[in-house]
Image (tube, rainbow, N blue to C red):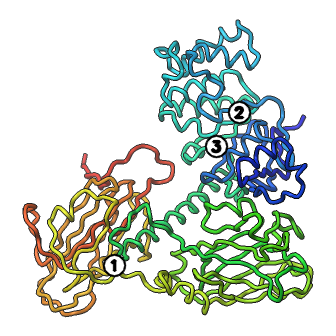
Amino acid sequence: MSDTAIRLSGLGKMYRLYRHPADKVADALGVNRILFWRKHYYQEFWALRDLDLTVKKGERLGIIGQNGAGKTTLLKMLIGNVMPTEGTVEVQRRIQALMELGTGFHPEFTGRRNIWASLSYQGLTGSQIKAKEGEIIDFAELEEFIDHPVRTYSAGMYARLAFSVATSVKPDILVIDEVLGAGDAYFVGKCVDRMRSLTAEGVTVIFVSHDMASVQRFCSRAIWLQRGRVVADGDVLDVAKRYLKDTREREEKRLWAMNVKLRENGTQTSLTQLVEFRKLIARFVTSEQPSLRSPHPISRVTIRGADSVLAEVHVGETMDNDVSAPSHTIIEPGATDWGEAVKVAERYCREFKSIDDKSFHAALQLGLDLSALESGGPYRAEIEHFDAGSEPFRFELFDGEKYLQAGTINPAGTERWCVAELPLDEVLPLIFEDGCGDAFAPAVAPAVAPAVAPVAQLLAEPTEEVIDIHGGEDARIESVNFLDAQGRERFVFSLGEPMRMRIKYRVLKPIEKILIVLAIFTRDGIPVYNEAQPPVEDSLKPGTYSMEYVFDPAPFGPRDYVVSTGLFPEFDMSDDSRLQPHYCIWDRRSCFRVEKPQGVQIELGLLRYEPVKRKA
């Protein structure tokens, strides 16, 4: 007897994205098959593709990934709610799924009546349901509410009842999608114990969650889905480490971009407007004539700096036309010449080809990574294409008014995949010289008019409406950097890890003394650290200076933090009733994050301290 519970082979799901609601109705009624001349009334969107997976009986498989990675689509195909576009799904015996809170529950029925209705649907008789009713209510701990309508239940009560009913009858396969996220920690612990006991009896469990601690606690194997593909499969701890590393790198980039933006002199910049990418429109176009004699398969477009990737599109892969992604192919029916995603020589791609002899170009959006731009050039584009035919075609970048030629690809007819490299050192500066030139220069805030601010302005509850610089005529702050023990700049630290905060400032005129004030808040405004350093007594000549705060270990609990700092001639900590003169203030212009150690779930508070050592 086979020990395989689930086998997926070449699984893929494509959704049609219609241009107009009427097109969807016409397609459902079969009208578009009659109107054969109507083409390109929808876009194709591959949520999953070419997925192979085998799950053994009794295995506890965790599925992790960011929102939109394709996890729910995969589960819906497993339980039969969605039919695959390609590939096969083989599921052995009975499957029970918890996909959404209260699925199958009637909101006007009481919890008790919903228990009976759900178990009756599963084929249990009245006597069997009666025998399980008490066990379900006891496990859910809803005795006081079991005869109330389900519509009056909280999300946590829904989760308790749904899980209790679903696991009261031992299924062969149990699928759980985020439903336990609404439960409290105590009940989640009960659920994990029950799932462990089920797998000990041979039940296969597929568990989807963003809570890595729960995945590690329960699952013996994990897969990481990213943009519709499995990027890691194996031991749950190894996969979790890779996923958390990727998440931290993404968070580092986001916070890096935020800090760069906060250093710029944009006094009305709100945190919700900050982006980590600069959009760049590119296209392929024929070199010699409007029409295309033969298709040109393209599988990858990459923009590189000196030692980093600035932007990349895997053309034809899953979700390559996802408009919410910073980089994507632009699939506009009737306006761009990208064909459907196909496989050429064992590689997914799209063909740049003549479609209806209308547009003769294929466009992409490239989101240039701001943190990668900091590393500098030389810059180049890499175009991975299938070298067929002999017709040349160009790669061009849009500067806001016109397309600038980046280079020409000249096929040689080798009938294999090749990478064409095109230098961009001359083109990119031209594109970004108006409004975006700072992408190729350090982001340093210029001096603004001097100002006088009250102490409360520095130490007040932060807001996200206005982020400003005050002062800068005699001395100005140039940067606030967060460094780890090795001196590398970072924005995300683990609890208890050493951290240094370096404040670099420039004296523009001779100054007798400068006093540095530092204030650190949580994102919701709770002050956690305020300190005024002793003043530098010696006369300061014009030049650049720095001050370092060393936290070893950092005393901050797991939170997001914002930092204010200022340069003062003097500072009275006991007086908040008057305006205090200052040279320069950076008001909440930097931020950092402290994270819990892996596997820790309890609340650790705002403060970390070394416990007092007691002698017996």
Q: At which x and y percent is residue 11?
A: 82, 50
Ranked by sequence position, the earlier of labels 1 and 3 is: 3
Q: At which x and y percent is residue 179?
A: 59, 36
Q: Amino acid at mark 2?
A: Leu
Determine which residue is flagged by label 3: 208
Q: Nearer the viewer, residue 485 or 250?
A: 250
Marks 2 and 1: which is nearer the front? 1
Splitting the image into 4 quarters, where does residue 5 fall? top right
Packing grade of label 2 (10 A; few <14, some 14-19, many >=20) is: many
Q: In this image, 616 relative to 46: left or right? A: left
Q: Nearer the viewer, residue 572 or 262?
A: 262
Secondary structure at badge 1 equals strand
The residue under the point 25% across, 49% down is 614
Splitting the image into 4 quarters, where does residue 311 fall? bottom right
Alpha carbon of mark 1 to alpha carbon of mark 3: how far?
42 Å
Secondary structure at badge 2 equals strand
Q: Residue furthest top?
A: 127
Vertical side of 143 occupied by 538: above or below: below
Packing grade of label 1 (10 A; few <14, some 14-19, many >=20) is: many
The residue under the point 77% across, 66% down is 334
Vertical side of 61 occupied by 68: above or below: below
The residue under the point 77% across, 16% down is 123
Which circle marks residue 479 in the picture? 1
